[in-house]
Amino acid sequence: MITAAKQNFRKLGGLFIAVLLYYIIHEGAHLLLALLFGTFRQIKFIGMGIQIDTYREQMNQVQTAAFCIAGAAATTAAGWTLLLATDRILESRSLTFRAAAFYTTLVFLLNDPFYLSILYPYVGGGDMNGIRLLIPELPARVFFALLLITHLMIIARYLYPVYKKAFVDSLK
């Protein structure tokens, strides 16, 4: 029997790993493009997060938009990769690994669509500031809102039930 403390530790550990992996993938995609474009300035540590700083004036609008969309594209692609690998992930006997994979999939599928459809106007714009250089803001917001709704439906109808069953079965 698994104690509540172990379950909570596994959940918090999985969530911590998910957030850490999110930063690595999302900001790593920004870093990769900044290096590719030759515009990387520095990595800024802001509170508990990080941000890739560039020489913005050296990028054209297409490069800026690509730089800004890269993080969301990378985390969405990684989220779908994890989603498609769910059956393989659940073959693992490690409950900690399963929890980390579950929370990472959730964070990758939900964070950027939520931010880019709903949250960004209240916190300075972030990546949307660059995205809207090429795509009008309203269609971009609608796209990310539809992506968010799609991901929520997939999570509710497939991902959560499959993981829940796997965790319940492993406790028997």
Image (tube, rainbow, N blue to C red):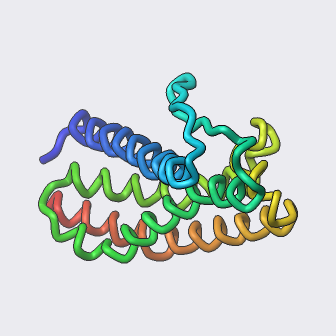
Which residue shows up at 71% across the image and 58% down it? 65
Place of residue 48 in the rendered image (x, y in percent of width and height, measured from the top left)? 50, 26
Which residue shows up at 57% across the image and 69% down it? 151
Place of residue 84 in the rendered image (x, y in percent of width and height, measured from the top left)? 37, 77
Which residue shows up at 49% across the image and 59% down it? 75
Q: Relative to the observer, which residue lies in front, 136 or 106?
A: 136
Place of residue 117 in the rendered image (x, y in percent of width and height, measured from the top left)? 74, 57
Q: Is residue 53 left or right of residue 12?
A: right
Spot the residue most to the top: 47
Q: Relative to the observer, which residue lies in front, 27 or 113?
A: 27
Q: Is residue 113 left or right of residue 104?
A: right
Rendered position, 13 above or below 152:
above
Place of residue 7 in the rendered image (x, y in percent of width and height, measured from the top left)? 26, 42
Q: In which quadrant of the rendered image does the C terminus lie?
A: bottom left
Q: Relative to the observer, which residue lies in front, 21 or 18?
A: 21
Which residue shows up at 78% across the image and 48% down it? 129
Q: Relative to the observer, which residue lies in front, 154 or 42?
A: 42
